Image (cartoon, helix red, strand yellow):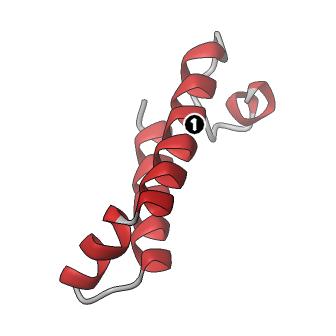
Amino acid sequence: MIAAGRAGYAPAGDPAPPVTMVWSLGAGLAMLAIKRPLAAMSAERGSSLTELTTQVTALFQTMLRNA
């Protein structure tokens, strides 16, 4: 995360907040995928679980860049 901050991909400074955010996002997506609500949500939207998680990841990357 420190290297990502230096490269402009993540906020510079204390890495603990963005690391915790990444960890939470990953753990949350994994839990929702295992418990199946993401698959149902994806199906309702006419997409796949992979497409939804790709969109979530892209949104997260955008949020980090704009932080």
Residue displayed at 39% across by 66% down: 36
Count of number-bearing discs: 1
Residue displayed at 63% across by 41% down: 9
Work out which residue is located at the far bottom of the displayed protein and give it: 46
Quarter of the image for the N terminus: give it.
top right
Q: Is residue 57 left or right of residue 45?
A: right
Q: Nearer the viewer, residue 14 or 57?
A: 57
Quarter of the image for the C terminus: give it.
top left
Q: Nearer the viewer, residue 30 or 67?
A: 30
Asked if residue 57 can be seen in this view, the reply is yes
Crowdedness near tag 1: few (<14), some (14–19) or many (≥20) residues, C-alpha within 10 Å: some
Q: In this rendering, is residue 16 above or below 45?
A: above
Q: Nearer the viewer, residue 8 or 23?
A: 23
Q: Is residue 58 left or right of residue 11?
A: left
Asked if residue 58 can be seen in this view, the reply is no
In which quarter of the view is residue 56 placed? Answer: bottom left
Q: In this rendering, is residue 15 above or below 1?
A: above
Q: Nearer the viewer, residue 42 or 51?
A: 42
Q: In this rendering, is residue 33 above or below 49?
A: above
Residue displayed at 76% across by 24% down: 2
In which quarter of the view is residue 37 placed? Answer: bottom left
Q: Secondary structure at mark 1?
A: helix
What amino acid is labelled 1 in the image?
Val
Q: Position of residue 25 (x, y in %)?
A: 49, 41
Q: In this rendering, is residue 19 above or below 34?
A: above
* Residue identified by numbered label 1: 22
